[in-house]
Structure formats: C-alpha cells, structure tokens
Image (tube, helix red, strand yellow):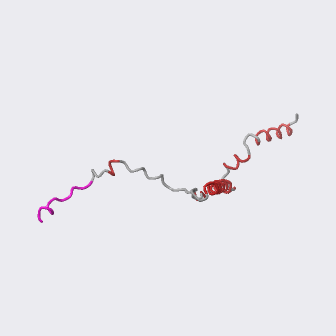
Amino acid sequence: MDQSEHHRLACLRRCRLVFPPARLAFMPPLLGVYVFTDWLAIAATDWCFRLHGRLIMLPLLGVYVFTDRPPHPPLTATTTDGHHRLPLPTGYAAAD
C-alpha cells in the first residue's frame, strides 16, 4: 500500500465516523444549520395540527434567541411574602 492509497483510506474512515445529518446539526449557522432545524420544527407543528385539528403548538421558528445576560432568577418566598415591606404609618388612622 503506497502513501497516497493509505491517505485516501484514512480520509474515508474519518468521513464515515459521523453520519451526515448529525454533521449537519453541528455546522455553524452560516452554513445553514437553522434551515435544517427549522424544517424539523415546521414538521412537528404540522403534525400536531393534523393530529388535533387545531394548532396547539406555537410555531417554533423563533427559538433562536441569544441574550447578553443570563435569565433572571425566580422569585423566592422572602421577596414575595410581604415581610420586607415598610411599616405603614399608624398616625393617620388615629387622627380621624
């Protein structure tokens, strides 16, 4: 086996390690990855509509939302139970 034949076989082995649709899903956005995933979202929405006769799933075409900060933490009981409110002035009720 000469060097060029060995190189060709090694290339074929490397290319077959990952199935082509899986390679498509991990490609950068500039190469059309979102077209592939949007097609899956459209198919899921269409299937849901045909199954139930009405659209119960929102179209998933806008799921690619990138933010510059992490999501807000959920409110805890200490911030929602009212224990941290300022005391109400009681002098107003006594004046009436």
Residue 41 vertical placement versus 22 (above, below)? below
At x 41%, y 50%, the residue is 74
Residue at the extreme left of the image, as rendered: 95
Question: Does 43 sit left or right of 10 as displayed?
Answer: left
Image quarter for residue 36?
bottom right
Q: Which residue is pictured at 61% across the width and 58% down the height?
A: 53
Q: x, y percentage for residue 59?
A: 59, 59
Residue 18: x %, y % from top left: 72, 42
Q: Which residues are magenta?
A: 85-96
In depth, the one of 76 and 15 nearer the eye is 76
Q: Quadrant of the C terminus?
A: bottom left
Residue nearest the observer in this picture, 76 or 10: 76
Does the magenta run of residues contain 89?
yes
Q: Residue furthest bottom?
A: 96
**Tally of marks:** 0
On the image, the x and y values in percent for residue 40 come to 66, 53
Position of residue 47 measured from the top left corner of the image (x, y, whole percent)? 65, 54
Pick out the residue farthest to the right: 1
17 up-or-down from 63: above or below: above
Q: Quadrant of the N terminus?
A: top right
Residue 56 falls in image quadrant: bottom right
Q: Residue at x 76, y 42 (%)?
A: 15
From this viewpoint, which residue is outermost toward the top?
1
- In reply to whether residue 40 is colored magenta, the answer given is no
Relative to 81, is 71 on the left or the right?
right
| In this rendering, position of residue 96 left or right of residue 2 | left
